[in-house]
Amino acid sequence: MTIESVAALLRDAKRVLVFTGAGVSAESGVPTFRSDANALWREVDIRNFAYPDGYRRNQPDAWRWYGQRAAKVREVMPNAAHEAIAEIERRVPEFLLVTQNIDNLHQRAGSKKVLELHGNLREARCFDCDARSPWVADPVCEACGGLLRPDVVMFEEELPLGAMEEAREAAESCDLLLSVGTSNLVWPATEVPRYALRSGADVVIINPDMSAQPTGLRVTYLKGAAGAILPELVRIAYANL
Ligand code: BV8
Ligand code: ZN
């Protein structure tokens, strides 16, 4: 399928689900996890920082690593891909953005209906009493003296209550799912496009790298960068509307 035929699908879609991963923020300068030279997981051993036991053992380095990421994502700007996704939301009758990202860039670009499967870096919270906390220098909870942590879902932690149910419901009722910038390696998020496919929706994958992507009769690949493809898709879909 060409970008023009995908644009026609988008224009006619009544219910759209956009599913994003770190690749949608790559052009904002946010490092992805695996796919580029400064990939985050190359820089640190995720066992030490992104699992609860490792996080507890590696203080204050693990706290500082997330604190630096929280500062970094506040400094960068949403890119044309984030803006195009916010435009799609304004154009379609029913919309949900399901993101694996924790950088808050979708919300800063104007997206409203955002389901954050893996939490976010907007603030921190206490491991022991769950109190919210700003990103202070040392990971000590003001309320109870417990250990502070980022408000994200670490590996081997459950996703926010109801998050996968909401994502599944939207995936099973959408006409079109756009999967943007994800390597589909992390479960259960990786089930979202599969729910849509099983329910007969069209699935469009936007990514420069097509390895490990869902396959199927109704899957279309638009190979390339989200910051180039999504604005073009929106321009064609909504031209003279
Ligand atoms: C859970 C928050 C129950 C923190 C994250 C064995 C096999 C399978 C699964 C498992 C297993 N063992 C354990 C599991 C389950 C585990 C899991 O999936 N592990 C993985 C490592 C195999 N999952 C969990 O633990 C989940 N919880 O299952 O609970 C349980 C309980 C007890 C024991 C077991 C299970 C919790 C998972 C959530 C982890 N938290 N993030 C933080 O961000 O630091 S995951 C994190 O990594 C992201 O949120 C995201 O989900 C994932 C990264 O993936 P992507 O976003 O896709 O990014 P990536 O860099 O990989 O890819 C970038 C893509 O962009 C590439 O495709 C690239 O080509 C593309 N790209 C690059 N540039 C561009 C672009 N695309 C477009 N435009 C561009 N310009
Ligand atoms: Zn506390």
Image: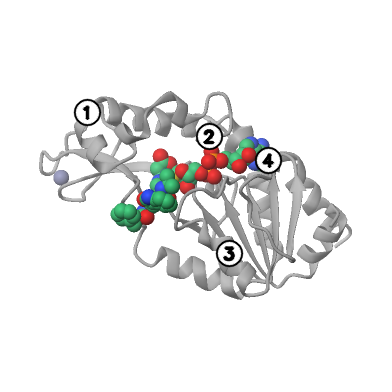
Left or right: where does residue 15 sit relative to residue 51? right
- Ligand 1 near label 3 (Cβ, under 8 Å)? no
The first of marks 1 and 2 along the sequence is 2
Query: Disc 1 to disc 2, how far (Cα)?
Result: 24 Å
Mark 4 or mark 2: which comes first in sequence?
2
Residue type marked 3: Arg
Mark found first going from the N terminus, 3 or 2: 2
- For disc 1, the neighbor class at 10 Å (few under 14, some 14 to 19, many from 20) is some
Mark 2 CB in 8 Å range of ligand 1?
yes
The residue at the point 62 percent across, 75 percent down is: 199
**Circle on res. 59:** 1
Is any atom of residue 79 visible in this view? Answer: no
Q: Who is closer to the viewer here, 146 or 217?
A: 217
Note whether 69 is above or below 131 in the view shown.
above
Per the image, the residue denoted by label 4 is: 209
Q: In which quarter of the image is residue 14?
A: bottom right
Cα distance, mark 4 to mark 1?
36 Å
What residue did someone put label 2 on?
Answer: 34
Between circles 4 and 1, the one closer to the viewer is 4
Whichever of callouts 1 and 3 sits on the residue coming sooner in the sequence is: 1
Distance from Cα at disc 3 to Cα at disc 2: 22 Å
Q: Who's the residue at 50% across and 69% down the image?
A: 168
Ligand 1 closer than 8 Å to the CB at disc 4? yes
The residue positioned 67% from the left and 44% from the top of the image is 81
Q: Element type at marker 3?
A: helix
Which picture quadrant has residue 37?
A: top right
Sequence-wise, which precedes: disc 4 or disc 1?
1
Callout 3: few (<14), some (14-19), or many (20+) C-alpha neighbours within 10 Å? some
Look at label 1 and name its amino acid: Gln
The local secondary structure at tag 2 comes to loop
Circle 4 residues within 10 Å: few <14, some 14–19, many ≥20: some
In the image, what residue type sits under mark 2? Arg
